Image: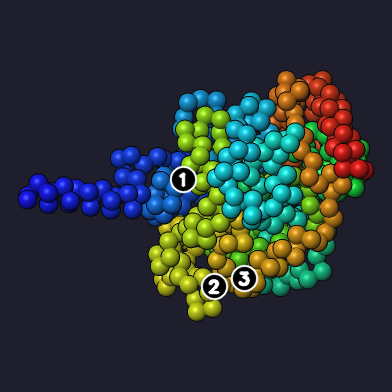
Amino acid sequence: MKKKVLAMLTIGAMAMSMAMGTSAEDVDKLVVALRITGTTPAEVDKVQEKISEITREKIGAEVELLIIPSGSYKQQMTLMLSGDEKLDVMGCNSGVYTTALASEALKPLDDLLAEYGTGIIEAAGDEWLQQGQVAGIQYGIPVIADSACGYGTFGMRTDILEKYDIDVSNVSSYDDMTEIFQIVHENEPDMTVVAPATVGYSPMQYCIEWDKLGDYFGVLEDHGQTTTVTNLFESEGYRNYLDVMHNWYESGFFSKDVTTATEAGSSLMKAGNLFCYFNANKPGIETQEENASGVDMTFVQVLETFTQTGNNWQWTIPENCEYPEKAMQFINLLYTDPEIVDLMCYGIEGEHYVVNDDGTIRYPDGVDATTVGYNMSANVWAVGNEFLAKVWETNDPDVWEQTKEWNQTGIVSKAYGFFYDNIDVTTEMAAVQSVYDEYRMSLECGALDPETTLPEMNEKLYAAGLQTIIDEKQEQLDAWLAAQGE
């Protein structure tokens, strides 16, 4: 009798274990890499455990969030992809994506997507997913978020504007911004006036007037309204940008260490050391950046809104992923499961945010942007399906509907949907990238005089093979346009 009872208890325990998912000892672990523009939240471990409670049950896997600051993201991903470090799911911007493709470090996703990503297909649609395809093969899953970008946007501390009675209602140019910066600089000489938003990136990422076609080495000028690939670094738009940045640097608006800064614009503003940083306009930008900086901000846009080719952020599965089926199942959750999306963006309900009666969310009482243990609302757009995330209370409740409408505004590049495959020019790409990296931050942050430095950089770029890259890109674009019937 005792043996029968013991057997029944054992079977019951096994059934309970199966109902709850795989045991902690047997569960697969997914390492998920995500780039952030600010600092890593203090309570990542607590949030990833909450995510894992859900994923253990739904897909039989737990999650480790590998959150890396933007300045070192590409380098760390490249090292991990080339080594034997565990990496199962990787978020990619265009730079990481093209580099990983060239080294054949990404898995083709077509079969995995068809079997384990049906929610993604339903949410994104075939046309949207084409942005993650190369030669008809799916390598990336583009995020569902804002695609139109309000370039030339500046986020400024509202209290400083009010303190010096600065009216920004008619600001529409770099010259207008120069006047504002001069007022602030004269009255707040110990404060940095303007800074890049992202560590390791120059302000140019938010000051674009061309379709960069993935990597800047051969672009379509005039917001992609031409189909002739040209050298960006010889364009009037690029030179104008450099002249403005050089003037601002010489005027003392940038910090002298801007090229080597290790703190994002939002972090500097949170510490009280910065007046303004570059950004890209879209519905909800104020809430996104105020949550990151912890201060009230005012935004102005001085360049055109437009949509470039491709998608700025995609989810991928590295070739050396240990559990590709589980990895795709997790990515599928990022596009279909609001609870997972909210955890990734805002943390744990009741600890990192609370829900208002109208369904919007806010910080818990006694907590703000400077003290909360987890908030990555500035990265909502990169999580997967942005439109599943809860809405912060300072946004309009219908901000996601506004964003969908926003995506239909502005200029659309004639190459929208084209993806450039640099596999045949990897040697030239490496050489050209090396030259560009030598000058990029110092030139594009204004520390170097473009009058003398830009011709020098162009000479080295051509010697490294830039024209070969431009010709290859033009050939691929022409073939793509022909296939589109254009």
Identity of the amino acid at label 2?
A: Thr
Q: Disc count in the image?
A: 3
Res 444 → quadrant: top right
Identity of the amino acid at label 3?
A: Asn
* Residue 213 sits above or below residue 352 on the image: above
Which circle's residue, 3 or 1, is located before the other in the chain? Answer: 1
Mark 2 to mark 3: distance in Å?
8 Å
Q: Which residue sits at x=61%, y=43%? A: 114
Question: Pointer 1: what residue?
Answer: 65
Can residue 263 be seen here? The reply is: no
Question: Pointer 2: what residue?
Answer: 360
Find out whether the residues at labels 2 and 1 contact each other: C-beta distance under 8 Å.
Answer: no
Which circle's residue, 2 or 3, is located before the other in the chain? Answer: 2
Quadrant where the image shows the C terminus = top right
- Helix, strand or loop at mark 3: loop
Q: Position of residue 266 (x, y in %)?
A: 58, 55
**Mark 2 closeness class: few <14, some 14–19, many ≥20 residues within 10 Å:** some
Identity of the amino acid at label 1?
A: Leu
Q: Which residue sits at x=46%, y=45%? A: 65
Horizontal side of residue 234 vs 429, given as left or right: right
Q: Nearer the viewer, residue 6 or 248?
A: 6
Q: Which residue sits at x=30%, y=40%? A: 25
